[in-house]
Amino acid sequence: MSVAEPAGSGKKKRRGFEARPGFHVVGHRLALDPNASALQALASHCGAARVAYNWAVRHVLASWSQRAAEETYGVPEAERVPWRSWSLPSLRKAFNEAKHTDPFLREWWAENSKEAYNTGLANAAAAFDNYAKSRRGERKGARMGRPRFKSKRKARLACKFTTGTIRLDDRRHIVLPRLGRIRLHEDVQPLVDPIAEGGTRILSVTVRFERGRWFAVLQTEERQTIAPANRPGTAVGIDLGVKTLLVMADSAGEVREVANPKHYDQALTQLRKASRTVSRRRGPDRRTGQAPSRRWEKANAVRNRVHHRVANLRENHLHQATAHIPAEYGTVVVEDLNVKGMVRNRRLSRRISDAAFGELRRQLTYKTQRHGGRLIVADRWMPSSKTCSRCGVVKAKLPLSVRVFECDACGLVLDRDANAGHNLTALAAANRKTGTGVAGDPGPALVVVPKPRGAKQKTRTARTRKGTGTRAAGATPHQGTETRDRRQDTRREQLALW
């Protein structure tokens, strides 16, 4: 039987933090080198956050289960147990009462900072809010289910500190509430000086365990400074790919490439060997309650180190590849790729995931804003690879196996990725009439360019069912398929590249 559930917590949402005029919020991730006592304290705080989250989920869902049982007994709506609010103040009040009476909590809750429990309660409140918005259709993406309990083995270790003693003690240490002084892995003097001068202040610190080590993520409010691009009047179009990660074609006619190092493919031999070793050990089994052996944990740690190294190398390469682009060009044009649909191709999914197209676009977005430029996102259905960058004729078909673009109208012969880059660069000139300038204009930094032509987004009509229609059973109709080249209408403002 379906049970009615509350549409929301009934509390008015508060506005989020807004930086002061002339300031912006920046995150800094600092690696930690904690000693044995600090390691134990960090794990304890993160475990307390997980316990508080599970307590909040159990606290709210208990009223839902009770109301469902009362509905089956025929209890009237007015006499049923009231809904429990999942707003953060309500959860805090209920948890502060329970920590003194619950036998499980009152034994050890005083060992950790209150910020640890507040982290779990805040995450639970956000989870219920997202679930309610998903039920009301106010949240994008797939439908969400009810918040579930976090497993001790699988839950990500994280704890957020917003109040108390939070400071950088010196260039190699950070001080956190109840955790005390923890050594940093690297020198942070460039961050200590702005804090001492008053141009930067720490808003919060989140400690988390990822990729085999502990990190402290500082959220700071810093004075906004814009380093203008070296060529503010030049635009660049970026075509993403698997074989070549970036193909950049600027408005001056220069074409440059950034190779894809394929870190995951290079580590496949090590991963296969490490995975075979793990499979030969006695691992955990949730069905029987079997605990993993020490040899399995050691072998699994070796395999995880390989994954962590691949992730670190990928992240470092992406930062190096995207750092110089906004610093040089005032306008950056990128594609809006359907990465979620692309990874469904089992032949290319591993390499597409290794290329990290989504992370590339995320880095280009905030780095372009940092340099006062603008980022133009082309429409997902723009035929950038099939359009001739000289005359504007669009090819009917251009398979992925064809790596060289040959125009039948003007005779242009060019690499298909470079041709796509030139077409993306042309969007910057066509978009100047919208009023958003280049490099520091007060207009929006992110511009989404709609599809330049009015054709349908479907590339072909749907398949007919077997045994229906006048065509042969199982045949594919081609009435809606393009069979000849056409001229792109918006190419009249093509840049003088050739």
Image (cartoon, helix red, strand yellow):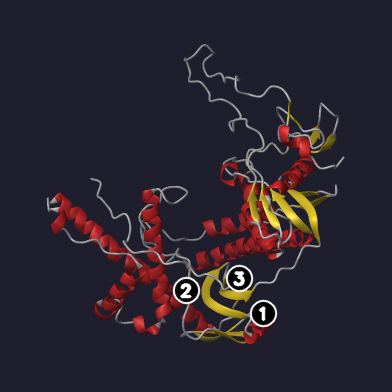
- Identify whether 468 is placed above or below 347: above
* Spatial separation of the CA atoms under disc 3 and disc 1: 19 Å
Q: Residue at x 46, y 60 (%)?
A: 283
Q: Residue at x 65, y 84 (%)?
A: 192
**Mark 2 or 3, closer to the camera:** 3
Which residue corresponds to mark 1? 186
Tell me the crowding category of disc 2: few under 14, some 14 to 19, or many 20 or more residues within 10 angstroms, Cα based: many
* Spatial separation of the CA atoms under disc 1 and disc 2: 21 Å
Which residue corresponds to mark 2? 159
Q: How many marks?
A: 3
Q: Residue at x 33, y 58 (%)?
A: 8
Q: Is residue 463 visible?
A: yes
Which sits earlier in the primary sequence, circle 3 or circle 1?
3
Regarding mark 3 in the picture, which secondary structure is present there? strand
Q: Which mark is residue 338?
A: none
Tell me the crowding category of disc 3: few under 14, some 14 to 19, or many 20 or more residues within 10 angstroms, Cα based: some
Left or right of 49, for residue 462: right
**Where is residue 30 drawn, in percent x and y?**
61, 75
Tell me the crowding category of disc 1: few under 14, some 14 to 19, or many 20 or more residues within 10 angstroms, Cα based: few
Regarding mark 1 in the picture, which secondary structure is present there? loop
Q: Is residue 241 visible?
A: no
Which residue corresponds to mark 3? 26
* Spatial separation of the CA atoms under disc 2 and disc 3: 19 Å
